[in-house]
Image (cartoon, rainbow, N blue to C red):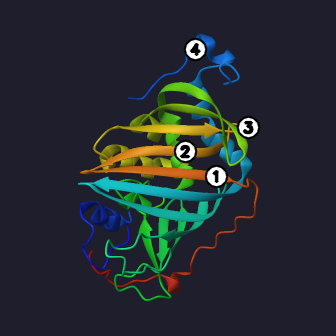
Amino acid sequence: MVHRHRRTGGAVVAAAAVGLMAVTSGCSHTDAAADGTGGGDPADVVREAADSVVRAGSSKASTSMEMASGGTRVTIRGKGVYDFRRQRGRFEVVLPQDPAGDDEHRPITELMTAGALYMKNRGAGVPADKWVRIETRSLSDGNLVTGGATDPLAAAELLRGARKVGFVGEERVGGVEVRHYRGVVDLRAAARAASPGQRGALGVAAAKGFSRGSVPFDVFLDEEGRVRKLRQRFAVADANVASTTLLYDFGVPAKVRLPAEKDIFAGKIAGQ
């Protein structure tokens, strides 16, 4: 997560800095064919969403992470591209201003991979031309909230553990007809069912990342079963984190080049 230079804004801003940081069942199995799901169990439809985005190859993505604690709320936003087949993404992540409004932050460039998170313009004593590399498995939440932008593939992989899924209705997201589903993710089940590249990090998240073993979600799937919008709600210590991921322009070029070893900062990071 990205460390802030001042501890202003309350516990939730601190939580964002540490790393950068009910459920309804709207239809039964028997009426699934009539509710727009195309037949079958809604849970099965949702669990296949990760495979659908991988088949799509790549997409543009935007992320929003809202953190709330002790009456304070902050939002971190990101935008970029993701290559689902190579499991790599590049995002520009924007931190919120300090409450006083006088502390500007340069966007943080993040490179996401199955095994690591790279960050540039991180501050905290890191030279401007250097990257910070963090092993994904070293993050207690598996980089679902740490970087301030949820890894889109990790978010989709969580849906492999979908439970208590109900079909909500047909809607439009970004001008595209979608089907809206709501349910909860069993974190341990998601980690067991995850693809090899994501299994380790999600296993860590399931074991110690969150104060609950389940994650409520709302997902909006297009006619090809691809995620168009995914909102997940995580409980982290004394904070609640709502992560929203939007995927669009599937198939766009998404070349993500990882930094050379000489460009990675090897010194001590302030605050760690």
Visible in this render: residue 193? no
- Secondary structure found at label 4: helix
Residue kind at label 2, given as amino acid type: Leu
Mark 2 residue crowding within 10 angstroms, few (<14) / some (14–19) / many (20+): many
- Mark found first going from the N terminus, 3 or 1: 3
In this figure, which residue is indicated by the disc labeled 3?
224
Foreground: disc 3 or disc 2: 2
Residue located 61% across and 42% down the image: 50
Mark 4 residue crowding within 10 angstroms, few (<14) / some (14–19) / many (20+): few
| Front residue (pair 91, 85) | 91
Mark 3 residue crowding within 10 angstroms, few (<14) / some (14–19) / many (20+): few
Residue 100 located left or right of residue 86: left
Residue kind at label 4, given as amino acid type: His
- Mark found first going from the N terminus, 4 or 3: 4
In this figure, which residue is indicated by the disc labeled 1?
247
The quarter holding residue 195 reads top right
Marks 4/1 in contact by CB < 8 Å: the verdict is no
Report x, y in % for residue 216: 42, 37
Q: Is residue 198 above or below residue 257?
A: above
Structural distance between the alpha carbons of marks 3 and 1? 13 Å
Q: Is residue 46 above or below residue 90?
A: above
Residue 56 located left or right of residue 161: right
Structural distance between the alpha carbons of marks 4 and 1? 28 Å
